């Protein structure tokens, strides 16, 4: 062990930071043997000056000299900066300089002895002939060298005044300490070699970037730890750290040199290496020059390039919650959004008191940009929704989910969202609830249908809530966005077209329309469907239990109109040549009127159309996307036929009729399925024919299709993935969790309990073969709360709302499978039906099959994530119907994962707990053994007790969890089967309408 290593490991003072970063190549030898550095790597080329400005101590009663703090002003050329140092730091610097001087002197003596031995013939090399003068130089150091070594050595007596007891009055102490420190600084600031040493440069907080004039004045510099950088290669000596208390020594944390300058923060591997590892650009406060004119700053530049600065407008429609029931605090969101820019318009709806709407909500999740790009699906724009395919349940210390984003509503729902960076949960005790969702990106004509839906809802909310508020404008839909059926009478239509013509003539205002143009109440059409002369009913036998599935759609809805455009989960080039196409006979009587739209630009920005075209052309093309087997978070772009469907009614959109086209779409798609139906949804509450309580008939459609498959003796699969428990606060047995139990009641009533459940009816007809036709699943993940902490698990909350049919068609939107979302008279919803135009070769039921590029890639991506498949294993799930994939992989993985999680955690829900009494017993038993558990028994024991050949054996839970593949688990059909989960009369939910829960 070298002297330097001994010094690093010898005392407690030297474990405050990990070892210094490795020195640049070619520099290590020079710096370890001498203060002298090559001119190219020297920080100072002339001597700096330092002056002690102030001396202070934290406590007047504390006379410890090492606690004295010094404010040092350093001057170098045109640069000036302040240092704040303690006496202890000066002492450490002195020890480091003494060690360096000793090593250098020792090295020089060693070299002299080595050369002297070689001249005597004792060394390894042949003696070299030297003249007398050269020999004398070898044997006896010259006076110059003697003085050089002496000058590079700071005498110990110089530091003694610094560490003398600080006794006396405050002023006298300050004066003596200031004089002592000034004298000591002069010892090494008077030698250019010492000043350029690593120890002094670190003390002075300087590097090779400090004094480059183009980077501005000297600010703060020091070592910091970062974890986002690529791994820095170090030799074994540099990687070795004596202090085990630094967690980053064995993790992704790395120590780097940070240089703070006006406008950026630079990260270097070493202060003597100018090569940048990373640079973070920011801005300083705006300032003015000597003439009083504003200087150009980054913030000002960004602001001027902001689309809002050019007149772009952003319209945000928020659901106004009932504050007693929900704590989402939409008013706080509105205030924050309005503070962004005056062109941001925010409207909350409904106004509960005036409208009398307390039970229903606006549930759409859409973003529309320029009528050309839109995002639609189940993903809320709020905290707790970001996640990755790994679905980690822990994040300690916070790195991915800071503050309120570490979210688990089963444990605790935040009371306030204002302090966003404050943790709601103790990360060392409670896991987060991972979130699984699906969102679709659309490009092309269908986006204008989504925009038209937004305009209709915005205008209706404006008319009802703020008709006279100028800050909230009405929106004028483009003439090609308003279909004749929605224009009302001919007189009203002519008035609107005349208004549009006048608007086109008077388009001199400097504003680029984003969605539409603000207009007055007199100019705007209501976008209300005109009452048809007669009702159009579905051509098929959709009248179930006396209810017409079309729900009174207009005569215009008799045509199934489809828009063809690329669909993707990533941005792609829009094909402007794609035209609107009709597709007849697919979804009967779905009202999605065909409209045409073109890009609309303001005359204030004539170059914007050219810029927009260039942006589109720069995006990735669909033919550049890899194979559908390359699964991931983002799927390929594919040309599809799309149709927008929705659930709206008089209260939500001001329509004269209730529109339930999402409900129609579910029924029609399931009826036309040939081989399989794959569903992911937050809820699964539906009814069969004859059910007077549950009105939607998704369950009836599935039941009929399975019976038809049984009659035809063909294999048919229905796979449904739903949350294991409702994502609301409260344990199964908690007094305040009546809502959780109520939702569980309605879901079990739909699935397997009672005469209206699908499994009960299927067992009566096909017996045990029902499990071959339909099965239910959930998702679960696990992790360790912190280093050495317990293993924890939590359900992955399924929040996606999608259905895939035969790998050819998909339905993605915001609607849950329950009456709230599907009837149209309750929650407002929107979705998109997607039929692939691009086909790829696949397999279905053991035979060749032409699957859709978008639908197949979406299913493979979801299944690979749920099953934990590697990229090379995706091909084994190409056929979702064949037993090799459905039974041997999908079902087998779910069953094995379910067994392992029960053995390790005994978490709920599970098929072994049939009553609340059993749950109480299990909860008390786990809490007694562990001392702490989560609301759903999500903490593992330290050791598992297993039976091996009749003997009791112990095993580590992590060893068992290594056999878990992916996240898929079986949905527990027997959980709480002995309980009536409906609210009791003593619970407030008992007096609430049951429609709230289904």
Image: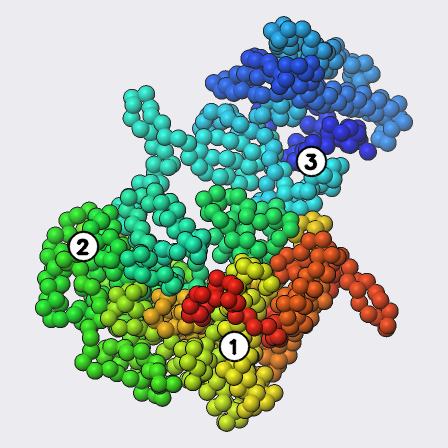
Residue 437 visible somewhere in the drawing: no
Against 209, is 148 above or below? above
In this rendering, position of residue 920 left or right of residue 641 = right
User: Is residue 533 toward the left or the right of residue 820 in the image?
Assistant: left
Mark positioned earlier in the residue sequence (2 or 3): 3
- Which residue position is annotated with label 1? 749
Dividing the picture into quadrants, the one containing residue 525 is: bottom left
Looking at the rendered image, the disc whose residue lies closer to the viewer, 1 or 2, is: 1
Q: Residue at x 61, y 87 (%)?
A: 768
> As displayed, is residue 332 above or below residue 609?
above
Q: Which residue in the rendered view is the most extreme toward the front? A: 986
Q: Give the class, few, some or many, for how many residues have Cα within 10 Å of label 1's Cα (few <14, many ≥20).
A: many
Q: CA distance from mark 1 to mark 3?
A: 61 Å
Question: Residue 538: image x %, image y %?
Answer: 31, 84
The residue sitting at 73% across, 21% down in the picture is: 95
- Can you give x and y, in whole percent of width and height, for residue 984 in the image? 53, 67
Q: Residue at x 70, y 16 (%)?
A: 64
Viewer-nearest residue: 847 or 813: 813
Q: Nearer the viewer, mark 2 or mark 3?
A: 2
Q: Nearer the viewer, residue 556 or 689?
A: 689
Figure check: 539 above or below 796: below
Q: CA distance from mark 1 to mark 2?
A: 50 Å
Mark 2 lies on residue: 519
N-terminal of the pair, mark 1 or mark 2, is: 2
């Amino acid at each position: 062990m070298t002297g330097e290593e001994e010094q690093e490991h010898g005392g407690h003072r030297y474990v405050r930071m990990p070892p210094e970063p490795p020195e640049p190549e070619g520099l290590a030898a020079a710096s370890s043997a001498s203060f002298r550095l090559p001119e190219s790597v020297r920080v100072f080329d002339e001597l700096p000056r330092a002056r002690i400005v102030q001396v202070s101590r934290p406590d007047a009663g504390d006379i410890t000299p090492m606690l004295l703090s010094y404010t040092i002003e350093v001057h170098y050329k045109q640069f000036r900066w302040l240092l704040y140092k303690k006496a202890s730091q000066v002492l450490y610097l002195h020890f480091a300089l003494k060690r360096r001087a000793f090593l250098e002197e020792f090295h020089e003596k060693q070299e002299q002895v080595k050369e002297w031995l070689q001249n005597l013939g004792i060394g390894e090399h042949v003696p070299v002939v030297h003249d007398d003068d050269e020999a004398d130089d070898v044997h006896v150091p010259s006076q110059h060298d003697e003085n050089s070594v002496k000058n590079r050595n700071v005498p110990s007596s110089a530091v003694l005044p610094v560490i003398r007891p600080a006794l006396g009055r405050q002023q006298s102490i300050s004066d003596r300490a200031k004089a002592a420190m000034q004298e000591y600084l002069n010892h090494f600031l008077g030698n250019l070699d010492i000043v350029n040493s690593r120890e002094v440069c670190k003390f002075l907080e300087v590097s090779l970037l400090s004094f480059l004039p183009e980077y501005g004045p000297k600010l703060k510099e020091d070592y910091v730890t970062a974890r986002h950088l690529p791994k820095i290669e170090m030799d074994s000596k540099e990687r070795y750290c004596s202090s085990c208390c630094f967690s980053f020594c064995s993790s992704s944390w790395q120590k780097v040199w940070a240089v703070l300058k006006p406008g950026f923060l630079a990260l270097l591997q070493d202060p003597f290496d100018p090569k940048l590892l990373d640079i973070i650009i920011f801005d300083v406060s705006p300032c003015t020059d000597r003439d009083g004119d504003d200087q150009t700053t980054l913030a000002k530049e960004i602001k001027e390039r902001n689309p809002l600065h050019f007149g772009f407008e952003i319209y945000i429609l928020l659901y106004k919650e009932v504050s007693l029931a929900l704590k989402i605090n939409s008013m706080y969101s509105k205030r924050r959004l309005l503070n962004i820019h005056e062109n941001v318009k925010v409207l909350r709806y409904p106004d509960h008191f005036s409208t009398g709407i307390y039970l229903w909500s606006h549930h759409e999740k859409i973003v529309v940009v320029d009528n050309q790009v839109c995002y639609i699906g189940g993903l809320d724009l709020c905290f707790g929704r970001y996640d990755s395919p790994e679905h980690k349940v822990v994040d300690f210390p916070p790195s991915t989910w800071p503050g309120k984003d570490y979210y688990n509503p089963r444990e605790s729902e935040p009371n306030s969202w204002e302090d966003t960076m404050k943790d709601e949960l103790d990360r060392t005790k409670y896991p987060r609830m991972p979130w699984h969702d699906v969102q679709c990106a659309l490009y092309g004509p269908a986006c204008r249908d989504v925009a038209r839906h937004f305009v209709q809802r915005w205008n209706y909310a404006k008319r009802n809530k703020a008709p006279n508020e100028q800050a909230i404008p009405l929106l004028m839909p483009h003439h090609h966005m308003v279909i004749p059926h929605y224009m009302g009478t001919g007189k009203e239509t002519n008035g609107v077209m005349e208004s549009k013509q006048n608007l086109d003539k008077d388009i001199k205002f400097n504003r680029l329309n984003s969605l539409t143009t603000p207009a007055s109440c007199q100019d705007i059409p209501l976008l209300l469907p005109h009452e048809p002369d007669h009702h159009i009913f579905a051509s098929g036998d959709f009248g179930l239990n006396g209810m017409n599935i079309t729900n009174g759609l207009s005569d215009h809805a008799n045509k199934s109109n489809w828009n063809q455009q690329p669909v993707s989960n990533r941005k792609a080039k829009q094909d402007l040549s794609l035209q609107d196409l009709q597709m007849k006979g697919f979804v009967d009587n779905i009202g999605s009127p065909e409209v045409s739209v073109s890009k609309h630009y303001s005359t204030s920005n004539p170059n914007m159309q050219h810029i927009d075209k260039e942006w589109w052309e720069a995006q990735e093309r669909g033919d550049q996307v890899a194979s559908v087997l390359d699964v991931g978070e983002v799927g390929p772009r594919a040309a599809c036929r799309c149709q927008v469907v929705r659930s709206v009614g008089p209260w939500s959109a001001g329509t004269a009729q209730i529109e339930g086209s999402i409900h129609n779409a579910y029924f029609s798609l399931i009826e036309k399925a040939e081989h399989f139906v794959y569903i992911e949804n937050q809820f699964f509450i539906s009814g069969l024919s004859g059910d007077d309580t549950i009105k939607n008939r998704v369950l009836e459609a599935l039941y009929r299709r399975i019976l038809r498959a049984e009659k035809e003796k063909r294999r048919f699969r229905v796979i449904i993935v739903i949350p294991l428990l409702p994502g609301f606060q409260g344990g199964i047995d908690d007094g305040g969790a009546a809502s959780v139990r109520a939702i569980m009641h309605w879901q079990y009533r739909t699935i397997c309990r009672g005469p209206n459940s699908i499994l009960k009816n299927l067992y009566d007809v096909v017996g045990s073969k029902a499990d071959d036709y339909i099965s239910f699943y959930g998702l679960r993940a696990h992790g360790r709360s912190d280093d050495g902490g317990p293993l924890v698990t939590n359900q992955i909350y399924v929040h996606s709302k999608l259905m895939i049919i035969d790998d050819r068609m998909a339905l993605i939107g915001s609607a849950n499978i329950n009456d709230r979302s599907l009837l149209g008279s309750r929650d407002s919803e929107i979705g998109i039906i997607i039929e692939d135009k691009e086909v790829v070769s696949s397999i279905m039921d053991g035979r060749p099959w032409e699957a859709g590029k978008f639908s197949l890639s979406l299913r493979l991506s979801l299944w690979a994530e749920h099953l934990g498949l590697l990229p090379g294993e995706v091909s084994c799930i190409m056929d979702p119907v064949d037993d090799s994939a459905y039974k041997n992989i999908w079902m087998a993985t779910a069953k094995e994962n379910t067994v392992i999680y029960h053995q390790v955690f005994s978490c709920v829900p599970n098929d072994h707990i049939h009553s609340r009494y059993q749950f109480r017993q299990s909860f008390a038993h786990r809490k007694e053994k562990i001392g702490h558990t989560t609301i759903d028994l999500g903490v593992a024991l330290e050791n598992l007790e297993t039976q091996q050949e009749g003997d009791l054996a112990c095993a580590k839970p992590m060893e068992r969890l290594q056999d878990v593949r992916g996240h898929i688990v079986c949905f527990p059909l027997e959980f709480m089967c002995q309980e009536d989960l409906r609210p009791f009369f003593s619970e407030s939910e008992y007096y609430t309408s049951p429609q709230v829960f289904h």
